[in-house]
Image (cartoon, rainbow, N blue to C red):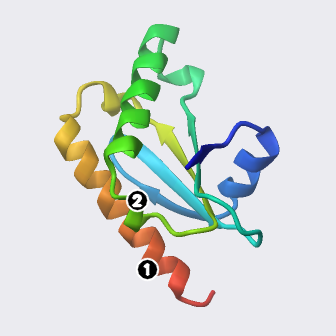
Amino acid sequence: MDRLRQRADFLAVANGRRISGPAFVLQGRRRDDPGPVRVGFTVTKKIGTATERNRIRRRLRELVKRADRGLMLPNSDYVLVGRRAALSRDFAVMLGDLRSALDRIARRSSKPD
């Protein structure tokens, strides 16, 4: 699994599927090229101070590390957009939210538009 780092990749994923949760928004998009799953993380300045944003980003990274790789579709990009609730929400509950969101994106991607 690789990380998304370029703005153009983040913008492309923003046009894909979106699942909202209390602690984060998961955006997902299938790519045409073969390659590993890529994940990006973002937290806006509206959320809080730099320390709070960094803590949210660290929690989101750890969620992805612990999530089942089988739930992530091959040749896909995902972006987790952190929300303020990620600071206080129980980690196990957030992990369940992520698994549910990945499953929902996978089901939506299998349906034709």
Label 2 environment density (alpha carbons within 10 Å; few <14, some 14–19, many ≥20): some
Residue 69: numbered disc: 2
* Badge 2 or badge 1: first in the primary sequence: 2
- Determine the residue positioned at 26% across, 44% down: 94
Residue 6: x %, y % from top left: 77, 38
In this picture, residue 44 sits left or right of residue 21: right
- Determine the residue positioned at 54% across, 78% down: 109
Query: Which residue is situated farthest in the right direction here?
Result: 8
Residue 27: x %, y % from top left: 55, 56
**Residue topped by disc 1:** 107
In this picture, residue 64 sits left or right of residue 13: left
Corner quadrant of residue 51 = top left
Q: Quick one: 68 or 43, which is closer to the camera?
A: 68
Residue 40: x %, y % from top left: 59, 42
Q: Amino acid at mark 2?
A: Arg
Residue 10: numbered disc: none
Q: Quick one: 52 or 30, which is closer to the camera?
A: 30
Question: Mark 2 or mark 1: which is in front?
Answer: 2
Corner quadrant of residue 89 = top left
- Determine the residue positioned at 31% across, 59% down: 99
Label 1 environment density (alpha carbons within 10 Å; few <14, some 14–19, many ≥20): few
- Determine the residue positioned at 18% across, 35% down: 90
Q: Amino acid at mark 1?
A: Arg
Q: Quick one: 46 or 15, which is closer to the camera?
A: 15
Where does the C terminus fall, quadrant-wise?
Answer: bottom right
